[in-house]
Image (spheres, rainbow, N blue to C red):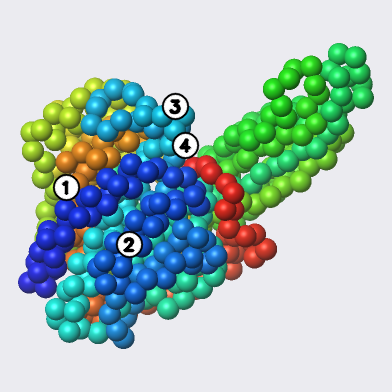
């Protein structure tokens, strides 16, 4: 389709400035809801490209939206730019070398994610204007995907109410349409309050909140035998109550992340976790309160959109990398275990190819279901709007997610090539939807049929505000 070829040229022309944007965001890694420099960089890029810019969406200071065009359908391209804690790493080297001890880093590639999405939206804007077509393209800069569920709060606030189609992507080892499979989840803090005392002179007067946390964790560990095998429960200590062993800890806080295939299953599991917390409170004569921080629904698929995106992948072909790209990827892959490399293939549903370090092939929609999935706040968007996601090859096969190896590859030429490749796919997909509104109608009909019988369980309770004070990860 010549329409698609034309829009790809728009992507090629503007790729350098968006590769630079990606590198700029890589250099200022910021955690959930604190992505002030990254959001500002995206807002500046939107303004420079002539988008109508809105900031502070849904009461979130680091959420930004740019719109271009008039009338017609509204197609949103979603971006992210949050980083992860503890993953500071120099770029371009295949050894662990933090820039800043315990600093943050883009260990999920969101510097690339936001930049490629904005590049795609810019190409679509120019293409619409060039052809004089009705339609509006929006870029949504979405913060706090890593545990903050910002898109869910944006959905709840009506930010996506008039959107017809949503398109997104994620950095990966392989390229192809992302299968719509993820785990619903909810993140909750449990805070225990006891009574401090001298641990030697008057231990009988103390009531240890830390003991309550430990007992709760033991109880949840025993619960694991009696829950669905696809469910996951993780926890991380947020406040141990102090560093002095001779003081009975009067307060302590633990964060729990509960996941399962559906939001209904998550809520049922969470009720059991709450009972265990209450039991720990009774055993230690402490009190316990809980605070819901965030939650994500499971992904809702869309056959027409997935098939359309796959056709764009097939027309474009896989990304291509040069020998320098492969040499660096080979050095990175040498730091990965055989199990990590095997896991990468299993997640993609592909058979290994000996010596393959960067994927110059596409994962077909017909590939087996991925082995092992996480959670994403794109899932909540997909309940509201017909949604499709791509995976774009930007790093060496076997690179663990949320790792220093992934951070090290975030500014590599191979990452920039992957950024351009997936931007073309997203832009081409959007262009075909604008050129043929019947495809938009088919996608919306598919979405309506899928969601007609879904339980009316919004993942984030109505009284829970965006957790602007939190940081963490999914």
Residue at image mark 3:
101
Report the front residue among 388 and 84: 84
Q: Compared to 239, does 144 lie above or below?
A: below
Q: Residue at x 70, y 42 (%)?
A: 190
Mark 2 crowdedness (10 Å alpha carbons): few <14, some 14-19, many ≥20: some
Q: Does residue 384 appear in this view?
A: no
Q: Compared to 319, does 240 lie above or below?
A: above
Which comes before the other along the chain, label 2 or label 3? 2
Q: Is residue 177 left or right of residue 404?
A: left
Q: Does residue 470 appear in this view?
A: yes
Mark number displayed over residue 44: 2
Which comes before the other along the chain, label 1 or label 3? 3
Mark number displayed over residue 417: 1
Residue at image mark 4:
85
Q: Is residue 185 left or right of residue 299?
A: right
Mark 3 crowdedness (10 Å alpha carbons): few <14, some 14-19, many ≥20: few
Give the SS element for disc 1. Answer: helix
Give the SS element for disc 3. Answer: loop
Give the SS element for disc 4. Answer: loop
> Can you give x and y, in whole percent of width and height, for residue 178 in the image?
31, 53
Q: Quadrant of the N terminus?
A: bottom left
Q: Residue at x 24, y 40 (%)?
A: 411
Which comes before the other along the chain, label 4 or label 2? 2
Q: Using the numbered discs, state the Cα–Cα distance from disc 1 to disc 3 in whole angstroms.
A: 30 Å
Report the front residue among 4 and 63: 63
Mark 1 in CB contact with mark 4 (< 8 angstroms) = no
């Amino acid at each position: 389709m010549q329409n698609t070829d034309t829009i790809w040229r728009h992507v090629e022309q503007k790729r350098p400035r968006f590769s630079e944007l990606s590198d700029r965001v890589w250099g200022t890694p910021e955690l959930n809801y604190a992505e002030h420099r990254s959001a500002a960089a995206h807002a500046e890029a939107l303004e420079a490209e002539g988008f109508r810019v809105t900031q502070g969406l849904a009461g979130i200071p680091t959420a930004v939206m740019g719109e271009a065009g008039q009338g017609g359908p509204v197609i949103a391209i979603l971006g992210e730019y949050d980083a992860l804690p503890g993953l500071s790493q120099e770029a371009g080297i295949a050894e662990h070398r933090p820039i800043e001890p315990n600093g943050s880093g883009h260990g999920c590639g969101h510097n690339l994610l936001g930049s490629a999405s904005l590049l795609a939206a810019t190409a679509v804007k120019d293409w619409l204007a060039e052809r004089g077509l009705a339609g509006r393209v929006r870029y949504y800069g979405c913060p706090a995907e890593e545990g903050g569920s910002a898109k869910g709060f944006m959905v709840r606030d009506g930010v996506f109410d008039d959107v017809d189609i949503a398109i997104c992507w994620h950095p990966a080892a392989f390229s192809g349409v992302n299968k719509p499979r993820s785990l619903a989840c909810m993140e909750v803090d449990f805070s225990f309050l006891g009574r401090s005392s001298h641990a030697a002179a008057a231990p009988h007067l103390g009531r240890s909140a830390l003991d309550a946390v430990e007992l709760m964790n033991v109880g949840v560990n025993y619960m694991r035998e009696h829950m669905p095998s696809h469910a996951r429960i993780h926890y991380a200590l947020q406040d141990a109550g102090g560093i002095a062993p001779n003081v009975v800890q009067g307060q302590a806080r633990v964060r729990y992340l509960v996941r399962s295939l559906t939001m209904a299953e998550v809520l049922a599991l969470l009720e059991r976790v709450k009972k265990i917390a209450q039991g720990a409170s009774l055993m230690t004569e402490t009190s316990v309160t809980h605070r819901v921080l965030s939650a994500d629904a499971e992904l809702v698929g869309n056959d027409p959109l997935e098939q359309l995106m796959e056709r764009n992948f097939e027309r474009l072909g896989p990304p291509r990398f040069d020998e320098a790209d492969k040499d660096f990827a080979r050095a990175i892959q040498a730091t990965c275990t055989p199990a990590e490399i095997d896991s990468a293939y299993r997640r993609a549903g592909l058979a290994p190819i000996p010596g393959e370090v960067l994927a110059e092939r596409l994962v077909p929609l017909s590939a087996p279901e991925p082995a092992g999935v996480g959670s994403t706040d794109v899932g909540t968007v997909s309940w509201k709007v017909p949604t499709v996601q791509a995976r774009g090859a930007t790093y060496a096969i076997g690179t663990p997610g949320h790792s220093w190896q992934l951070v090290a590859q975030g500014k590599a030429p191979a990452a920039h090539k992957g950024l351009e490749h997936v931007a073309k796919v997203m832009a081409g997909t959007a262009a075909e939807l604008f050129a043929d509104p019947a495809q938009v109608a088919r996608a919306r009909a598919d979405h309506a049929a899928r969601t007609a019988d879904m339980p009316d369980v919004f993942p984030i309770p109505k009284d829970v505000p965006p957790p602007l004070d939190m940081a963490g990860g999914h």
